[in-house]
Image (cartoon, helix red, strand yellow):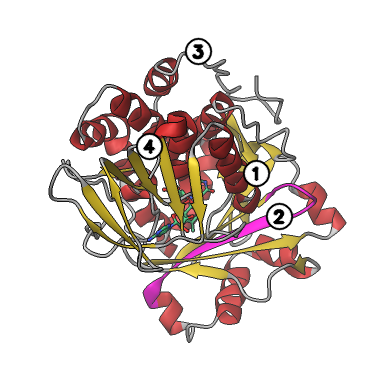
Amino acid sequence: MSGDVCIVGGGLAGAALAARLGSRATLLEREAGPHDKVCGEFLSREAVLHLRALAVDPLALGGHPIGRVRLATGRAQAEVALPFEGVGLSRRLLDEVLLRRAASSGARIQRGQAVTALLATGPVQMLRLQDGRALRAAQTVLATGKHDVRGWRRGRGRQNDLVGFKLHLRPAPSEHAALDGVVELMLFRGGYAGLQRIEAGQATLCLLIRRQRLVELGGRWSAVLAAACEDAPLLARRLAEAEILHRRPLSIAGIPYGYVAPADSAVWRLGDQSAVIPSFTGDGMSIALHSAALAATLLGRGARPDALQAAMCRDVGIRVVAATMLSLCGVRRPLQPLAVLAARLLPVLVAELAAATRVPDRALQAALAAHGRRPGLCPGPAGAAGPRPLS
Ligand SMILES: Cc1cc2nc3c(=O)[nH]c(=O)nc-3n(C[C@H](O)[C@H](O)[C@H](O)COP(=O)(O)OP(=O)(O)OC[C@H]3O[C@@H](n4cnc5c(N)ncnc54)[C@H](O)[C@@H]3O)c2cc1C
């Protein structure tokens, strides 16, 4: 094995760390090639800045700039400028570009290699691969996202009963225009759906629904979609003449929203292995990239894994908990019209909540500055009407 750090998982967190460590890193990714992921594909400003620090520009990749959020439930709607600008970009493309970036920095990338077991009791750690081989590493990094390696299961979150679905679609021309520069958040009984444009004239629909409601709907995707469209007619309009690009949506269950890993001195945990923020914030990717930047600095200093978890608790812990409280309220039907009303009457509240559920600027600046780059922070135009290029 070349390098002393073995990274398990080649999503954003794992690939970003590999790109920063270069020849110190070997990355094992179980998927052999580009693949879709259950993700709303909204990159927050913090995520974009982390990516740019790694010489990956989501806008240059064809991503769609987003500066507003439209909240809808029943016939009620409210549109608010975000306090920052984000970008819609597919994970199929982004993760691949980042993996290539890691390879070009000297990291050893092994695709189609699932880690099935990890023994981490002494100074040298043993990883078992699906093909029966074993690898040794001085440091192991778990960056397996929503999936746990056997024996290294995460604990429960504060909201564990949501099931996620995701698909790509090509909106009809009029709906395509209506989605210009905006992410739509549509609330329905037992869940919510996010819709936004990404590259190549496509859009991402990502939907979360409580397990109990899913059971009531017979567990069928068609019934879920019909129920969501009935409660949120805006969704019905967007989908009416859209070309759905997947035969069936991708899905995921058992997401431990609100989870923040306890300090662990044996292995490093990045991204969703470290903290899981509710999807409506559109900040999971930023947290994944943030954890990678922190881990690269700490590994460079010879620190232990628990130092990373302490830093993650400091930077995002309370934000993850606050966002989960909001998420628990957001899936309750009686409260949903109140959310739209509040956004209409107090748009500044939405901006405040959006800011309160993301990686704070000082933490972002510190993480990036540690790698010798001062990020060109662009404080978003609170109150600006539309998107503008990220500086
Ligand atoms: C429904 C939903 C919507 C979301 N929407 C957004 C959004 O709009 N914006 C946002 O910022 N965040 C969003 N998120 C969160 C975001 O997707 C995650 O926070 C982010 O993907 C975490 O990155 P990661 O690198 O930790 O994990 P992942 O991106 O999940 O990557 C993990 C990688 O590890 C690999 N892997 C897994 N197990 C093994 C193994 N045993 N061996 C080898 N490889 C393995 C996987 O194949 C995968 O490539 C959403 C999440 C969900 C569930």
- Residue visible at 65% across and 45% down in the picture: 89
Magenta residue check for 204: yes
Q: Which of marks 4 and 1 precedes in the sequence?
A: 4
Magenta residues, start to end: 197-212
Pinpoint residue 228: horizontal percent, then vertical percent: 57, 69
CA distance for labels 1 and 4: 34 Å
Cβ–Cβ below 8 Å for labels 2 and 3? no
Q: Which of marks 1 and 3 precedes in the sequence?
A: 1
Cβ–Cβ below 8 Å for labels 1 and 2? yes
Which quadrant would the C terminus be assigned to in this image? top right
Q: Identify the mark at residue 216; answer none if there is no mark.
A: none
Q: Identify the mark at residue 88; answer none if there is no mark.
A: 1
Residue named by callout 3: 374
Q: Is residue 79 visible?
A: no
Pinpoint residue 147: horizontal percent, then vertical percent: 37, 61
- Residue visible at 37% across and 76% down in the picture: 212
CA distance for labels 1 and 2: 8 Å
What's the amino acid at mark 1? Gly
Q: Which of marks 2 and 1 precedes in the sequence?
A: 1
Q: Is mark 4 within 8 Å of ligand 1?
A: no
Q: Residue furthest left?
A: 122
Q: Is residue 273 visible?
A: yes
Q: Is mark 1 within 8 Å of ligand 1?
A: no
Q: Which of marks 2 and 4 precedes in the sequence?
A: 4
Please give left or right for residue 31 compared with residue 369 in the image: right
